[in-house]
Image: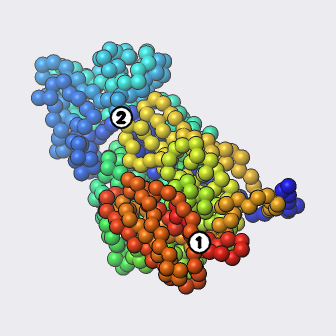
Amino acid sequence: QGKLTIENKFGAPLNDLFGIFFEDLNHAADGGLYAEMVQNRSFEFEPVDHPDYHETFAWTVDHPNDVQVRTDHPLNSNNKHYLAVNSTGEAVKIANHGFNQGMDFQADHTYLFSVFIAASRRSFIQVILEDEQHHRLSAPLTITTDRSDWQKHQLVIRANRDSHQGRLIVEVLPDSQVNLDMISLFPTETFHHRKNGVRKDLGDVLAAMQPKFMRFPGGCLVHDGTLNPNDRESMYRWKKSIGPVEQRPTRRNKWGYNQTLGLGFYEYFQLAEDLGAKPLPVLPGGYDPHHKRAVPIDQLQPWIDDALDLIEFANGDQTTKWGKKRAELGHPEPFNLEYLAIGNEEVGQPFFDRYPYFHQAIRQRYPEIKLINTSGPFASGSEFNRGWKSAKKYGSDFVDEHYYMATDWFLANQHRYDHYDPKGPKAFLGEYASKENKWINAVVEASYMLGLERNADKVGLACYAPLFCNVDYPNWTPDLIFFNQYQVSPSVNYYVQQLFMNYQGTRNVPHSIDGLPTPTVKDAQPIIGQFGFEGDLADVTYQNVTFIDHETNQQQQFKFKNGRLAERARHMLGKTSSQNYSLTFDATRTGGRVDKGFHLIFGQTTDEKYFMWVL
Ligand code: AHR
């Protein structure tokens, strides 16, 4: 018989424990949450973003000789390319198929069309929605113009039938001569009716979770890039992502496609507010660990200013430069920023040499902001410890931990945070997932989340990653929510996240269970050390792995099949205190991220014996 003891007192507050993490990978923003239906609206797609790209990617033109991509009279210097159409004899039909296999139109729904036009003579343009068989789905609407300077025109178009594979048709009528740019189509109904907003169905599925916070905009997308903010492939600089969308430069997304920045920092803050989630932006810390590019320390000030200005943008009143900017964009009230992360998953001393400059400048001006340091993409090890050391030294409020592991790892590490120091810094589990979307993964994540709740005095924030995946453009699996242009399919893991967020308590209640058969996992406590061999930095396939215990001279072969550990095993060890072990292995480099690693977890049984788990 077991005995459950519940203490008659409150434990740690759960505060903002469970939230979400949005990154534009898997076309999560462009072609996803961002409701823009036109792909390549500004003709800025280039092969540097993706080898298949060119300026008219996603567009088809029926009279190519009448159409040119030009740059001599651009809409602005951030938006260089435009389409010059001279319809001498016949009408010229330009079509965009959007993302996936086409655009989703629904009968009786309306769509906001907009375009910038500069005309060399009196010109006529018709706008029509069509299905994939070229049948009309809307009555044609006409724009007439003779303005030679760039002018924005807007129309509301009503669809009269459904189509999941629709196209937007812009027809330049005979004897017209126009330059066209920023050809855009949005559903008029967006989540919370925001202009330049997000897809309602995807916004709704986020809102149904009731996240306490939203981390954005990445991920590796933030810190993978060059140091010059004007480069197309620069690190993510938030100031480029606000203001009129036609003035935002598009960029090469780390995940191999073009990022319009249409979903920018203003929209992220707005979305967080609409979701009732606290915003949690991530800024680059002047170091790209992917390419080992570091801003010289004496040139770090603009990067630090980006952080200070962002806080002012979010929280400053209208007498401040950036608070005024926010008000001009349509949000006079502050966004109430509390959390700010410097760096994402950083590896390498150069980041930790730069972090203190950000930390001290922000602390000095905004002592109320909770600062988040980072411990790299590892659950343990020297790089992981480097982040924690830096956080403790400078007094960061949180350390961002990221790990994507097998289900067994999550089960074996249920008690990971029991041993953390409640005096802080707290852990922010900013990215985690067990590596598939099967029910067992969801169950294991749920049981792990109970460990997070139990340790709410040591873990302040946690969010699953990645959040979204457009099924036609996957960069990464598993993910939480799958979608295409008209369907949304949350994973089983999503429902676990939703359950925990919907029913997140305010405080945990200390409790214990005695007298039950000791579960195997408990038997493994305390975990005294662990080593992982998987992920980015171990992009290898293992074979012939031998573990040698030099105390006992025992050798253990681990069996691998197709590069994956074939059998999990538990081994009793000699003494652990001497740590007199070695591991030999043959490995083939595969390149890229793989999940065929293994973990050695060292534990101690209740009767003081030491053992090792191989998972
Ligand atoms: O979530 C996907 C990626 O995983 C993130 O961009 C990065 O931080 C991590 O490596």
Q: CA distance from mark 1 to mark 2?
A: 55 Å
**Mark 2 lies on residue:** 99
Depth check: give the residue in front, 510 or 348. Answer: 510
Identify the residue at horizontal 24%, vertical 51% (top origin): 48
Identify the residue at horizontal 53%, vertical 82% (top origin): 551
Q: Is residue 289 above or below residue 232?
A: below
Q: Secondary structure beneath disc 1?
A: strand
Q: Residues within 10 Å of mark 1 (few under 14, many from 20)?
A: some
> Which of marks 2 and 1 precedes in the sequence?
2
**Mark 1 lies on residue:** 572
The amino acid marked with disc number 1 is Met
Viewer can see residue 342: no
Q: Is residue 84 above or below residue 312?
A: above
Q: Residues within 10 Å of mark 2 (few under 14, many from 20)?
A: many
| Residue 59 coordinates in the image, percent (x, y) | 25, 32
| Residue 3 coordinates in the image, percent (x, y) | 85, 58
> In this rendering, would 576 be left or right of 181?
right
